[in-house]
Image (spheres, rainbow, N blue to C red):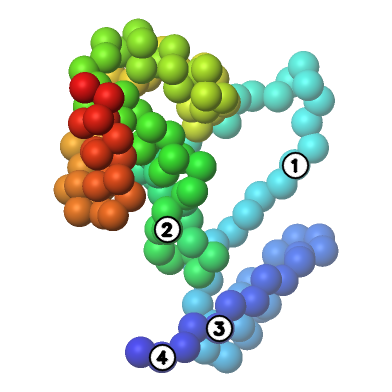
Amino acid sequence: MPRVERITEVVNGALDLSQLLAKTQEGWKLVAIEWHREVSEESAEPVTVPHSVEEIPYGLRVAQDCHTLEMDPLEHKVLLDMMDLMVEDLPFSRVAADLNARGHRTRRGDPWTMAAVFNMLPRLIDIGPKLFTSMEWEQRRRKVARAL
């Protein structure tokens, strides 16, 4: 697979069409444009995210290559703790309370709620097979079995 080169150029003033054409003729392909503007707090309009943008699954983050996803260690720990608590057959309210007591927060920094835990069920189902085959899960399973 060919290596991909990336450059970032700061544009001073208006973007000139001849600059774009010159880069294209050199073999470059435009892949992103970032816009900045100064606004006062009073006149700032909320920025809406296009519907085509998908949220990154909880427990993952964008890798340094900006093309792949990798495990987010903090969120992965929350998922493991959440799975542990679910295996103990605790109600969602207790799972949320325990996660909060352990200092875990949602991706937005909010405390866990019953609804937030419930909304994580599809993600737990998605990653469940990977957790069940890992050595870490085996150790956690033994711990839960001893507690029962």
Q: Separation of disc 1 and disc 3 at Cα? A: 28 Å
Q: Which residue does the numbered mark 2 point to in the structure image?
A: 70
Measuring 44% from the left and 12% from the top, which residue is drawn there? 97
Q: Separation of disc 1 and disc 2 at Cα? A: 32 Å
Asked if the residue under mark 2 is in contact with the one under mark 1, i.e. CB atoms within 8 Å, the reply is: no
Query: Label 2 neighbourhood size at 10 Å, few (<14), some (14-19), many (20+)?
Result: few
Q: Quadrant of the N terminus?
A: bottom left
- The image position of residue 77, as x and y in percent, is 44, 40
Residue 28, can we see it? yes
Secondary element under disc 4, as helix, strand or loop, is loop
Q: Separation of disc 2 and disc 3 at Cα? A: 21 Å
Amino acid, disc 3: Glu
Asked if the residue under mark 3 is in contact with the one under mark 2, i.e. CB atoms within 8 Å, the reply is: no
Amino acid, disc 4: Pro
Measuring 64% from the left and 24% from the top, which residue is drawn there? 45
Q: Is residue 47 above or below residue 127?
A: above
Query: Label 1 neighbourhood size at 10 Å, few (<14), some (14-19), many (20+)?
Result: few
Q: Is residue 15 above or below residue 58?
A: below
Chain-order first, disc 2 or disc 4: 4
Question: Mark 2 or mark 3: which is in front?
Answer: 2
